């Protein structure tokens, strides 16, 4: 197995980026439309000159003064490892990008990065403020793609990202790409998810341990997510959102683009619907992704659920149509509260519906067997 | 004239029970003065002025001597104006204005007005019970409290209108008849809120019935205006009527809080505002007094906008929910107040109230997570049933009235009857111990369904037992010995979700 090893110059670049965090934040926010990845193409000297001309010499000097031992010590202190663009472990896919990170700093078992090729990786991104539909689809996509042997990449954010990670953790390997140091769980509410990914997947970042996130670091990490995967799937996103930036970056690299359709009147599905109109691959489930990645000869995912009573079928149809409360189902089917309640619990036990924290039901991706 | 000593028996209210106080009055030659000793609070100390004026205005004479009234035991803090009457009576006996040998076998309570009339007091029911325990033959009470005191058997009750009547009472000229005891309302009265006002909302109705049948706590989540508070207000109307003993308990609490006349008939219903303090909810102060939880004893405590309550307030409710008593410790005093109530709570699905599955909801994910996080506290852990409420449709609102409370109440009473036979009188399924819950008979299909959802939802051990209790209640409602698969499914659906 290739050792996780990075040359000191590449590592110093990571620390330089962390030092430049507030400076780049200033110029990135003062010039709307200027994307941080473009800045990151620049060499160290040009980047510093562009972002922090007044303290350029000072910053470069500080970084140059970091000894190899100091850098190694910093990595160990954050329980991290690193690999750089000159090493074997560095994912080949990233080299396609002109603005590829010089070094990746990661946490978790580095062996999981070995031999990662774009056609074995799928990036799932989407809105932080996702609907229960979007969350359910993301979780199911994550689970089934991981079960089919794909590595699922996402960004540990609220909403779609977290659901994709959780689904993938159930069945296989997932990679979280962070906009802060890999040793930091951001957002903090996802600390336990971050820990699970560290144990059963990999967390990577181009920033050194302890680096704080800035607004510009998120588009920056999006470019890594887009470059890693052969296909980027957008589940739910508003127009003009970070997820669409990731989609643009993926398209620029010549990667496939997938989008999960949503209601045309929903703001949170405007993004994927827009991508679909522009020719993105229609993703109705993991099977569509697998077909697009491996060609139509790929074995189909068969997940027919257990057989259903006709009455349960009626309830399931209503949940599918968006009636989430037991009360609405009882009223629509003229059932007693007890009957509707028992029906929903049976459907949940069969795996056809899931229930949110506030007691609202939504449909899972499990398909009903034919003939019912 | 030599010093003359007289005593009288009275009581002071301590939380919701009464403690005996012996009033000793000593009239001595010396500079005229009137002192009250024995840890009196301000209201007791001011009895001096009331007693002085009342005596003068009823044709008695206030002795111009050195008077000391001692309230024994001196270590007990005395509160309230209820000792006025006993001080006045002992003073009259000590100053030879009243010859009343029977006074030593009586208890006297009452607040004096300046004209000598006797004013009603809170807590007379508890005082009368304490008087009977202390062995008094009769209790002299303000006329306004006569009916309340007459609830206590084995004790003669003398309703006194004015201090002036003491003379005729002492001489035996006036022997009033025992007042009629206060009628105790065991069930909801006519015109109290009825469940038929709840139109549509079949699942909510069903959840209310299961909650009532097993004494399970209930959380309703739904948009504002969907009928959560309205449903909670109607829950007492489907609970079984109080027994006589329970009605006495609730009357004693209401009396001690001075709300005996204004409390609704039947089971208590309390809905404190979410700005309430921990002391207001479970009781507190110094000396400790009862809070909303105690006022809701044997009834319903409704916490609307559960997520808006202060966390420490809700935390304070934990132990009372487990033990059925609120233990309050303050400097120098410790008290245990009863509070066995049904907890009903309501919350919105997110800060804006629409629910995060609604496209109109503008709450940020962090705000929703933080809001719902408040539902995951230790209190929510003790809530059994989750009912998700939706806005009823126009047809439902304009439709037929629902089933009246009386019909549901009969089913609930029958289910409770089965629980009493199985668990012992007065106990309901929600109070089952884990061992009792695991003894519940399940059909094979029910056990299989429980096992399936247990692993799918990653239930905790506590949740497992709670589901068993709920299933048992649903089977009790149906009159079945073993829990069927359908009943287990209903229990699993009703069971509150565990928040990760």
Image (spheres, coloured by chain):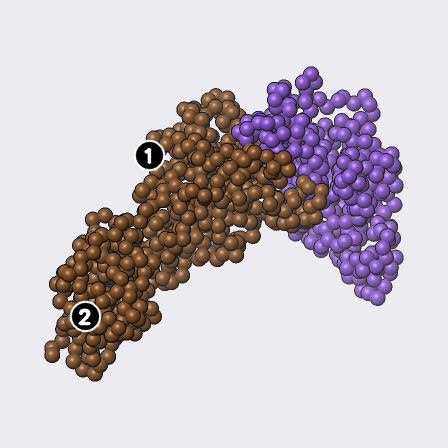
- The quadrant of the image that shows the N terminus of chain B is bottom left
Cβ–Cβ below 8 Å for labels 2 and 1?
Answer: no
Identify the disc placed on residue B92.
2
Residue occupying image coordinates x 41% and y 58%: B284
Residue occupying image coordinates x 28% and y 60%: B142
Q: Nearer the viewer, mark 2 or mark 1?
A: 2
- The x, y position of residue B237, in whole percent, is 44, 40
- The x, y position of residue A368, in whole percent, is 68, 22
- Quadrant of residue B26 in the image? bottom left
- The x, y position of residue B373, in whole percent, is 58, 47
Q: Earlier in the sequence, mark 2 or mark 1?
A: 2
- Label 2: chain letter: B
For label 1, the residue is B424
Q: Is residue B148 left or right of residue A345?
A: left
In the rendered image of the structure, the colour used to display chain A is: purple
Q: Residues within 10 Å of mark 1 (few under 14, many from 20)?
A: few
């Amino acid at each position: 197995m290739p050792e996780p090893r990075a040359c000191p110059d590449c590592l110093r670049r990571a620390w330089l980026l962390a030092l430049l965090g507030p400076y780049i934040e200033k110029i990135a926010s003062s010039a709307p439309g200027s994307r941080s990845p473009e800045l990151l193409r620049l060499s160290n000297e040009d980047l510093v000159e562009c972002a922090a001309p007044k303290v350029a010499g000072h910053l470069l000097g500080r970084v140059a003064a970091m000894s190899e031992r100091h850098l190694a010590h910093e990595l160990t202190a954050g329980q991290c490892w690193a690999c750089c663009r000159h090493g074997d472990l560095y994912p080949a896919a990233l080299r396609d990008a002109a603005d590829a990170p010089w070094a990746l700093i990661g946490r978790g078992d580095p062996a999981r990065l070995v031999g990662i090729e774009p056609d074995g990786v799928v990036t799932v991104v989407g809105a932080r403020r996702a609907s229960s539909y979007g969350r359910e689809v993301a979780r199911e996509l994550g689970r089934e793609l991981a079960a089919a042997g794909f590595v699922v990449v996402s960004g540990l954010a609220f909403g779609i990202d977290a659901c994709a990670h959780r689904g993938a953790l159930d069945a296989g390997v997932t990679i979280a790409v962070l906009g802060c140091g890999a040793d930091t769980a951001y957002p903090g509410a996802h600390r336990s998810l971050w820990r699970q990914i560290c144990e059963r997947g990999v967390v990577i970042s181009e920033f050194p341990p302890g680096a704080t996130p800035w607004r510009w670091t998120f588009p920056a990490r999006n470019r890594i997510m887009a470059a890693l995967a052969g296909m980027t799937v957008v589940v739910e996103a508003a127009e003009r959102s970070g997820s669409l930036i990731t989609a643009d970056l993926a398209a620029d690299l010549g990667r496939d683009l997938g989008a999960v359709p949503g209601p045309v009147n929903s703001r949170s599905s405007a993004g994927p619907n827009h991508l679909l109109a522009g020719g993105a691959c229609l993703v109705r489930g993991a099977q569509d992704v697998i077909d697009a990645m491996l060609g139509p000869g790929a074995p189909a995912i068969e997940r027919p659920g257990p057989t259903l009573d006709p009455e349960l079928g009626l309830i399931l149809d209503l949940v599918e149509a968006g009636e989430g409360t037991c009360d609405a189902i009882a009223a629509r089917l003229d059932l007693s509260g007890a009957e509707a309640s028992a029906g929903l619990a049976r459907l949940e036990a069969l795996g056809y519906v899931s229930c949110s924290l506030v007691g609202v039901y939504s449909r899972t991706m499990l398909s009903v067997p034919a003939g019912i | 004239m030599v010093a003359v000593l007289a005593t009288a028996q009275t009581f002071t209210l301590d939380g919701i029970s009464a403690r005996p106080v012996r009033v000793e009055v000593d009239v001595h030659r010396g500079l005229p003065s009137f002192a009250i000793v024995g840890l009196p609070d301000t209201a007791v100390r001011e009895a001096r002025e009331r007693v002085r004026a009342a005596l003068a205005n009823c044709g008695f004479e206030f002795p111009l001597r050195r008077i000391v009234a001692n309230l024994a035991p001196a270590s007990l803090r005395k509160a309230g104006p209820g000792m006025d009457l006993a001080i006045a009576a002992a003073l009259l006996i000590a100053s030879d204005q009243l010859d009343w040998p029977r006074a030593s076998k009586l208890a006297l309570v009452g607040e004096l007005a300046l004209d000598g009339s006797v004013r009603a007091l809170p807590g007379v029911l508890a005082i009368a019970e304490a008087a009977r325990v202390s062995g008094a033959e009769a209790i002299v009470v303000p006329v306004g409290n006569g009916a309340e005191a007459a609830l206590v058997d084995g004790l003669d009750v003398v309703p006194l209108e004015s201090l002036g009547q003491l003379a005729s009472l002492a001489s035996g000229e006036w022997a009033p008849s025992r007042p009629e005891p206060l009628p105790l309302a065991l069930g909801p009265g006519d015109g109290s809120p009825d469940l038929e006002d709840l139109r549509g909302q079949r699942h909510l109705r069903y959840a209310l019935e299961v909650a009532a049948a097993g004494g399970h706590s209930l959380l309703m989540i739904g948009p504002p205006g969907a009928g959560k508070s309205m449903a909670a207000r109607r829950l007492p109307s489907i609970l079984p009527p109080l027994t006589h003993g329970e009605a006495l308990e609730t009357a004693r609490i209401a009396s001690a809080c001075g709300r005996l006349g204004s409390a609704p008939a039947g089971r208590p219903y309390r809905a404190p505002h979410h700005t309430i303090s921990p002391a207001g909810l479970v009781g507190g102060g110094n000396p400790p007094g009862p809070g909303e939880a105690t006022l809701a004893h044997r009834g319903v405590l409704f916490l609307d906008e559960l997520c808006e309550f202060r966390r420490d307030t809700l935390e304070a409710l934990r132990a009372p929910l487990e033990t059925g008593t609120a233990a309050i410790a303050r400097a120098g005093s410790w008290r245990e107040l009863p509070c066995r109530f049904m907890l009903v709570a309501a919350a919105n699905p997110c800060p804006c109230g629409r629910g995060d599955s609604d496209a109109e909801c503008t709450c940020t994910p962090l705000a929703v997570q933080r809001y719902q996080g408040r539902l995951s506290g230790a209190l929510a852990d003790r809530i059994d049933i989750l009912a998700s409420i939706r806005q009823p449709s126009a047809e439902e609102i304009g439709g037929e009235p629902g089933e009246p409370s009386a019909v549901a109440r009969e089913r609930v009473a029958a289910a409770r009857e089965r629980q009493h036979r199985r668990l012992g009188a007065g106990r309901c399924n929600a109070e089952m111990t884990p061992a009792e819950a695991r003894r519940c008979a399940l059909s094979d299909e029910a056990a299989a369904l429980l096992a399936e959802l247990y692993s799918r939802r990653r239930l905790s051990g506590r949740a497992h037992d709670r589901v068993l209790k709920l299933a048992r209640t649903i089977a009790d409602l149906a009159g079945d010995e073993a829990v069927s698969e359908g009943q287990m499914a209903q229990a699993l659906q009703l069971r509150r979700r565990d928040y990760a």
